[in-house]
């Protein structure tokens, strides 16, 4: 009986863990942001995407840094969201690329 109980617990634990989901950080270049009123529009467009955890937008740097779950979304969806909001973007650099450059 103890063996069966342990097997059931192990099975439940194994199936409840997401299949290697990873949190990623990317920086998007949003070249046509020209003033501080652009920031909330870009931030809102990205924040509404399923899987996005955090968004930081800089009008000075013309960038949006996004932390997201790669099992729920991807860079193409992020770019699409900003573009649909009127702010076309492109991948500038991912956190892993920044670490390799150092």
Image: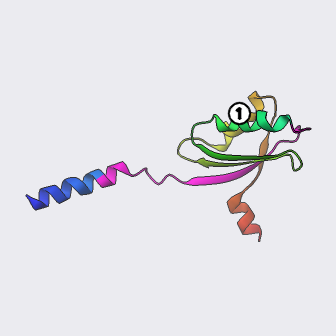
Residue shown at 19% from the left, 57% from the top:
7
In the rendered image, residue 28, in percent from the top left (x then y), is placed at 77, 46
Q: Quarter of the image for the C terminus: give it.
A: bottom right
Question: In the orientation shown, which residue stands out farthest toward the left?
Answer: 1
- Give the side of residue 26 with respect to residue 88, left or right: left
Residue shown at 64% from the left, 34% from the top:
48
Q: How many marks do you count on the picture?
A: 1
In the rendered image, residue 46, in percent from the top left (x then y), is placed at 69, 38
> In the figure, 53 relative to 98: above or below?
above
- Give the side of residue 68 with respect to residue 44, left or right: left
Tag 1 residue: 45
The magenta region covers: 13-36
In the rendered image, residue 16, in percent from the top left (x then y), is placed at 35, 49
Magenta segment: does it hold 16?
Answer: yes
Magenta segment: does it hold 22?
Answer: yes
In the rendered image, residue 1, in percent from the top left (x then y), is placed at 7, 58
Is residue 80 among the parts visible in the rendering? no
Scheme of image coloration: rainbow
Is residue 94 among the parts visible in the rendering? yes
Dot 1 lies on which element? helix
Instruction: Give residue 57's quadrant in the image.
Output: top right
Residue shown at 32% from the left, 54% from the top:
14
């Amino acid at each position: 009986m103890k063996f069966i109980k342990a097997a059931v617990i192990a099975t439940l634990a194994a199936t409840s863990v997401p299949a290697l989901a990873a949190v990623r950080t990317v920086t998007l270049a949003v070249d046509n942001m020209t003033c501080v009123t652009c920031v909330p529009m870009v931030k809102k467009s990205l924040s509404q995407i399923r899987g996005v955890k955090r968004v930081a937008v800089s009008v000075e740097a013309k960038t949006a840094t996004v932390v997201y779950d790669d099992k729920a979304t991807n860079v193409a969806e992020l770019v699409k969201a900003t573009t649909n909001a009127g702010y076309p973007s492109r991948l500038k650099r991912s956190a892993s690329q920044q670490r390799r450059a150092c």
